[in-house]
Image: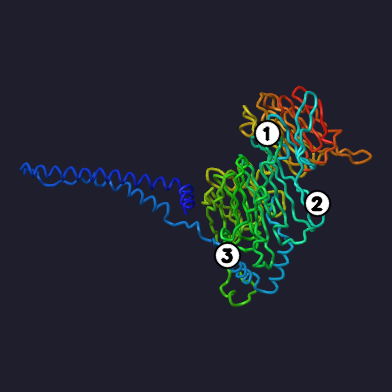
Amino acid sequence: MIFNIFEFIYNNLFVVSIIVLSILLAGLLGRKWYEEVKINKRLNVKKTMLRSLKNVTFKLPSMKRTLRVFVPIVFLGLFFLLSFSVPKDYTNHLKRVDNEETFMSIYTTFNERFYSTPLQNSDALSDRESQDAEPIGSKKVIEGLDFVAQDEERVYIANDSGIKVISEGEDTFKIENSLPYPSIQDTCETKTFDIKGIAIEGNKLVSVSYFSQTNCQENKGLVFDGPNTIIRVYDTDKDFELADEYIIAGHLDQGLYKNGNLVVASNAYLPSNPDKEMLESYFPHVTHNDEREIASLSDLRYIENTNPNTLLSLSLIDIQSGHYDFETTLTDYKYLLEMDENNVYLSTNAYQFDTSSEVFEMQNPIESIHTIISKFSLRDDEIYFSKTRQFSDRVTPFDGFILKDEKLFVLFESEDGHRLQWFDSQVDAVDSILLNNLKDYERLQFVNGSLFLYQGSNHTPIEEIQVTNNQLIPLNTIDYDKASTTGMYELASTDTSVAVSKTSYSLSVDLVSSSHTVLDSYNLDLAEYNISTPLTIYDTEAMNQNARKHTFYLPLLALEEDSNYLYKHMVVVLSIRDEREFIVEPVVELKNIENPMSPFTYRYLVVGDEDYHITPGGIFVTNESAPGEVIRKFSFN
């Protein structure tokens, strides 16, 4: 109860401030009015006692002073009238699951109506079983982590064999330590977890690994025997002692690491006929340093009228303190999820059934489908459920849910057509537009202040919407170059920037002025080159505090045709002269060290006055005086 009150005040700080200030001001003016009345009464008594019968009549304060008391109250009334003329209820569409009976009642009631005909029942259930518990929108990426990290003393590189801790000697490198990834023994063989990324936070090295369920698992219905995400935190000051270990049960959906906090979304899919006596076996759990915490039925919330087939868990971990929190929600596996460092937004379909379906088996028992958007707040190392909003008779396509810079964009489908809606961080509408009814929009992408809408798997956008000044503005012409932009890099202390664009056929690097004029371009034909992933251009000055000229490294995978097809790794080097043109420097050839290209292809770091070109197989070093010349290298094998 207390937490709910604090959360309400936090989410409505502006409104609460207006109410409190208005009440205080009204109280202050009322007190002054009352004090004047008291003084007049005493003065009247004194005059009567002194027999000063002239003007002995008791005086009230003037009308102006009296009306002044009611000004704050009138202002508060107008504020409520204008702001809350339509009350908003953020607590609807949720149910608490108190015990096994409630859980089974929710599950059975929904399924008896949703799968009310033998035909629909068989098709839908077979579809559910084929999903094998995988979240439909799973990204399996932990944003904010990478496979290469550094501190003042070491470089950390995660390749297929483990995390290499590298330090530099006088003339060469040395491997101080090699930290293995977690492994488990299942019914078939030992499986190693796939590394998802590492990071340095103060004196802590963080690694996240994931083991997905395989056919070797005997019982796929039990979360305990299913997939797991393992977070390990090592203390770099204590010879990489394992400080904390967290095992999160369930399929990894996605995650975010920022400012020392790691939030992970995971998913546990329920079998088609859950056993009431084994409900705890299906529930997600978090194990922290061998202490297991299982999601409780009493804390479980259900998003009303969604298909109750998935347990979605959010875990929040403070890397430095070791504190963690996790929340579980019962919902549909066809959910969409977006997160930033402060909030997590969840979109699910809610089904409204025909009332006749309670009695009769119907061909289509669903009367309408709605979208429910739920918000979770992340603060003070805790996860708080904030609110839900239902949007009637609207559904959201698979790629129609985007969060960018605290702006939530949702593409809705309804009988009236497609509607694009922009929400703020409180899930309140900012603007919306009705789109062309003749087009079938299925995908949404945000690039450099514009929303691009796509049809199916088509890589060419069919509409562009500009996002500006709290408005969504449809443009008559589409900027296809902007749509293909994969990165925009501002040059420090200049008015220019570098834009990288990629199409199916070519790669373009443009030097752009503050007036958006292209000053110079560097182009590659992708029939000759295959771009390594992820497509990134590395700016030496942006990554180095020392003043340096702007040099950019663009990793490529060149294909040479000889007697056989050979892959040759190289890095294109571009520098900028006078802020107006590119200079193509000699390429950096990453040769004579095997590059397995897993789990990454190439990374770049600045260490002192040297540039490190890192692959999973080793390190190549160049410097500013000769950007294309490898002055030394080091193999991990």
Real-space Cα distance between discs 1 and 2? 31 Å
Real-space Cα distance between discs 3 and 2? 37 Å
Decide if residue 281 is on the left or right side of residue 629. Answer: left
Number of residues whose C-alpha sits closer than 10 Å to that of mark 2, classed few (under 14), some (14–19) or many (20 or more): few
Disc nearer the start of the sequence (3/1): 3
Instruction: Tell me residue 159's x, y (percent).
Output: 78, 40
Q: Amino acid at mark 1?
A: Asp
Task: Tell me the colour scheme of the image.
Answer: rainbow
Q: Amino acid at mark 3?
A: Asn
Residue tagged 3: 99
Give the residue at x 75% y 46%: 182
Give the residue at x 83% y 33%: 635
Number of residues whose C-alpha sits closer than 10 Å to that of mark 3, classed few (under 14), some (14–19) or many (20 or more): few
- Label 3 element class: loop
**383, 429: nearer the viewer:** 383
The vertical placement of 304 against 475, above or below, is: below
Q: Amino acid at mark 2?
A: Thr
Real-space Cα distance between discs 3 and 1? 46 Å
**55, 246: nearer the viewer:** 246
Quarter where residue 323 is shown: top right
- Label 2 element class: strand
The vertical placement of 525 against 97, above or below, is: above
Residue tagged 1: 237
Quarter where residue 414 is shown: bottom right
Residue tagged 2: 190
Residue 485 seen in the current view? no
Single out the mark in the foreground, 3 or 1.
1
Instruction: Tell me residue 605's x, y (percent).
Output: 72, 32
Quarter where residue 534 is shown: top right
Instruction: Tell me residue 559's x, y (percent).
Output: 85, 39
The vertical placement of 395 against 491, above or below, is: below
